Image: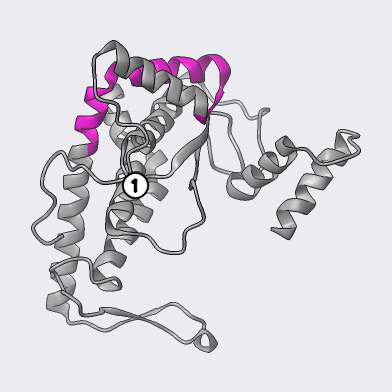
Amino acid sequence: MANIINEAALLAGRKNKTYVEQQDLVEAVERAIAGLEKKSRRINPEEKRIVAYHESGHALLAETTEGAKRVSKVSIIPRGLAALGYTLNTPEENKFLMQKHELMAEVDVLLAGRAAEEVFLGEISTGAGNDLERATDIIKAMVSIYGMSDVAGLMVLEKQRNTFLNGGTVKDYSDKMAEKLDEHIKKTLQERYEVVKVRLEEYRECIERIVAKLNEFETIDGDQLREVIASFEAENGMVSQLKHSKPVHEKPLSENL
């Protein structure tokens, strides 16, 4: 928090302001999360198109998946050393615990970028590498640490190490259990991926509208995003998926989850 406040003060000072404004704090948070904005970095039109669909997928699922964090901003302006675009999600309230449906919602949102590339572009890129890693880690933790599956039941498979031993986790399971864990993670990821693709197909025209706005303005905020989604749902007589708090699964999850 201190670093963010300090960064916001520096940003305000560079603009010769006498006090820190909300926009300075927002920019400081985005710098901490995604790095410095790189408007000077030139990416070719095809890569920009891929990024627009990728981030639109993340944003759409975040706003229409119950339990997911709401979107505060979507951008296709490069930041940091590697990010060609980003979707900024913020919780509506301070939380110290996550329920099972919220973890699965996060997995769906993470998978949505890659799924959008496949659904709308017919080909996938390397841009989803970190998303897939994080989604895999969430499902693995649900099984091995939080007892949220039938793979190991209530048995903890990974134990937290003492901080004096450099932290991390210690694996405490057999090779047979490892095979079951690997198969469960693979199966669950694929199941959620298929659910995400169905949602993207349902909102196909909505995604195109979001992409069009990103191509025009490069950045849209959460309210603008929700306006696009709400308008699409109203035009198509759909029951709004915005602002739900409990999970609705379009198809059964894995029998082991």
The x, y position of residue 218, in whole percent, is: 56, 22
Work out whether residue 158 can be spotted. Answer: yes
Work out whether residue 122 can be spotted. Answer: no
The x, y position of residue 169, in whole percent, is: 39, 78
The x, y position of residue 202, in whole percent, is: 22, 23
Task: Tell me if 153 is positioned left or right of 95 in this view.
Answer: left
The x, y position of residue 215, in whole percent, is: 50, 17
Q: Quadrant of residue 119?
A: top left
Residue found at x 47% / y 87%: 162
Does the magenta segment cover residue 211? yes
Instruction: Look at the image and give the residue range highlighted in magenta.
Output: 196-222
Q: Residue furthest left?
A: 255
Residue picked out by circle 1: 67
Figure quadrant of the C terminus: bottom left
Up-down relation of residue 16 to residue 53 (above or below): below
Q: Nearer the viewer, residue 245 or 220?
A: 245
Q: Secondary structure at mark 1?
A: loop
Task: Tell me if 107 is positioned left or right of 15 in this view.
Answer: left
Q: Residue furthest top?
A: 235
Q: How is the image coloured?
A: one colour
Residue found at x 31% / y 66%: 141
Up-down relation of residue 244 to residue 237 (above or below): below
Up-down relation of residue 101 to residue 162 (above or below): above
Does the magenta segment cover residue 30? no
Question: Which residue type carries mark 1?
Answer: Gly
Up-down relation of residue 51 to residue 24 (above or below): above
Tally of numbered tags: 1
Figure quadrant of the N terminus: bottom right
Magenta segment main secondary structure: helix
Residue found at x 46% / y 64%: 96
